[in-house]
């Protein structure tokens, strides 16, 4: 099992509600993917412009398939355009 | 419910096994805390010097109590001494 943390910092002035509205479309489709065990969006309590997913996947293959899925290819570039930075880490529990 | 991601980057040459051995002592005690729902250590698949906890807590009060606990006050400074950087984010699911 792999956990992914994708931490995004929105650009100054980016509309958080618009961002989350797009994100919810990705969530709805991603949770249908076979290898996806958890896919949740979070907002930082102290900085509302930090929006982070915490994800659980069966394996790296499932993540690769996710990254090539229609919903990711269609929506994620729009999300990325609203962020000034992105950190993605893939983790194994130790 | 609050999720916490604490991402640490170890100093060059720091002993990862020594770090994890100390960390396991914190894990064992922390999981006994009443407000703690999840407390897991992870290692980055692509950079073994990145060690991250993903945590779930009932509320901010539980996190404050954790931060004042004997095991945190005793062991966490030793972990911090082995890291060159630390990012801590508190999140609410959105």
Image: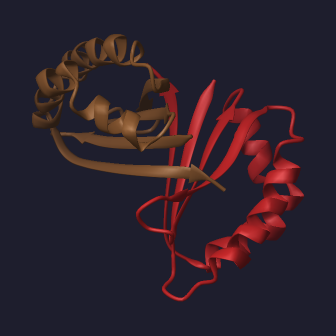
Chain colours: A brown, B red
* B17 horizontally vs B49: left or right: right
Q: Quadrant of residue A26?
A: top left
Residue at 50 percent of width and 69 percent of height? B48
* B56 horizontally vs A89: left or right: right
Residue at 38 percent of width and 39 percent of height? A61
Relative vertical location of residue A76 with respect to residue B16 in this rendering, above or below: above
Q: Quadrant of the C terminus of chain B?
A: top left
* A48 horizontally vs A38: left or right: left
Please state the total of marks drawn on the protein image: 0
x, y percent for residue A39: 45, 25
Q: Quadrant of the N terminus of chain B?
A: top right
Q: Quadrant of residue A21?
A: top left
Q: Nearer the viewer, residue B52 or A12?
A: B52
x, y percent for residue A13: 13, 32
Residue at 48 percent of width and 34 percent of height? A57
Relative vertical location of residue A44 with respect to residue B47 in this rendering, above or below: above
Q: Nearer the viewer, residue A35 or B93?
A: A35
x, y percent for residue B17: 69, 75
Residue at 60 percent of width and 30 percent of height? B2
* A29 horizontally vs B82: left or right: left
Extreme residue toward the bottom, this view: B13
Q: Nearer the viewer, residue A30 or B39?
A: A30
x, y percent for residue A37: 52, 24
């Amino acid at each position: 099992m792999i956990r992914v943390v994708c931490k995004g910092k929105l650009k100054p002035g980016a509309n958080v509600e618009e961002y989350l509205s797009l994100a919810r479309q990705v969530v709805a489709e991603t949770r249908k993917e076979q290898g996806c065990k958890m896919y949740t969006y979070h907002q930082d309590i102290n900085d509302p412009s930090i929006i982070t997913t915490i994800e659980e996947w069966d394996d790296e293959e499932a993540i690769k398939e996710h990254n090539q899925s229609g919903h990711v290819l269609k929506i994620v570039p729009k999300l990325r355009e609203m962020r000034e930075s992105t950190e993605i880490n893939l983790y194994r529990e130790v």
